[in-house]
Image (cartoon, helix red, strand yellow):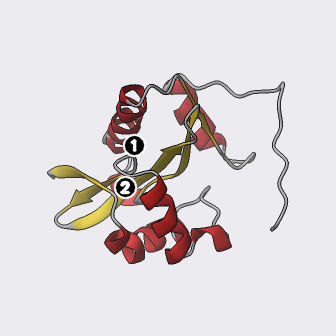
Amino acid sequence: MEYSYHLMKIEDYDALYALWTSSPGVELSGADSRESIAAYLTRNPDQSFVCKAEGRIVGSLLCGNDGRRAYIHHTAVAQEHRRRGIARKLVRLALSIQRENGIQKCHLFIVNENETGKAFWREEGFMERQDIGIMSREL
């Protein structure tokens, strides 16, 4: 099967949402509405990617930065397309753009119980932090 990689566009949203909701380990919230994703892509142009096979989105990686650090969200590959290097390629594309933007460090958010995801990210050179946590507040 031939895969192609493209910048994520808001026109991809319905397919992305379907991929995300069918991917174990990806948790969505109100911040993942079409409007919120459109705003994220506008603030972080040319930093998020999709993978397509036969015209259908089979992989995604949402990425952006705050000027200091990059952040990865919603890395997902459709079950039937896993173990083919898609996620690795998406990660490399996103991190390459961040380097070009002068960003020196990248963080990601992962569900604590997602052991498969943690193993993947470790293979990609990420390390789980024990010295910091995350706190959130609804606005």
Question: In terms of sequence position, does the residue under pointer 1 or pointer 2 come before the other?
Answer: 2
Closer to the camera, 6 or 46? Answer: 46
Residue 67, compared with residue 41, is above or below; it is above
**Residue name at image x 33 percent, y 64 percent:** 9
The answer to whether residue 95 is left or right of residue 119 is: left
The amino acid pointed to by label 2 is Gly
**Residue name at image x 81 percent, y 43 percent:** 134
Quadrant of the image for the C terminus?
Answer: bottom right
- Report, in whole angstroms, how far the alpha carbon at label 1 lies from the one at label 2: 7 Å
Q: Position of residue 43 (x, y in %)?
A: 48, 55
The answer to whether residue 82 is left or right of residue 115 is: left
Tags 1 and 2 touching, CB below 8 Å: yes
- Asked which quadrant contains residue 109, the reply is top right
- Asked which quadrant contains residue 59, the reply is bottom left
Q: Position of residue 23 (x, y in %)?
A: 52, 62
The answer to whether residue 105 is left or right of residue 135 is: left
The amino acid pointed to by label 1 is Ala
Residue topped by disc 1:
87
Residue topped by disc 2:
59
Closer to the camera, 90 or 38? Answer: 38
Q: Position of residue 45 (x, y in %)?
A: 38, 52
Closer to the camera, 25 or 104? Answer: 104
Q: Position of residue 57 (x, y in %)?
A: 30, 64
Q: Secondary structure at mark 2?
A: strand
Q: How many marks?
A: 2
Q: Secondary structure at mark 1?
A: helix
Q: Give the number of the disc on residue 131.
A: none
- Asked which quadrant contains residue 12, the reply is bottom left
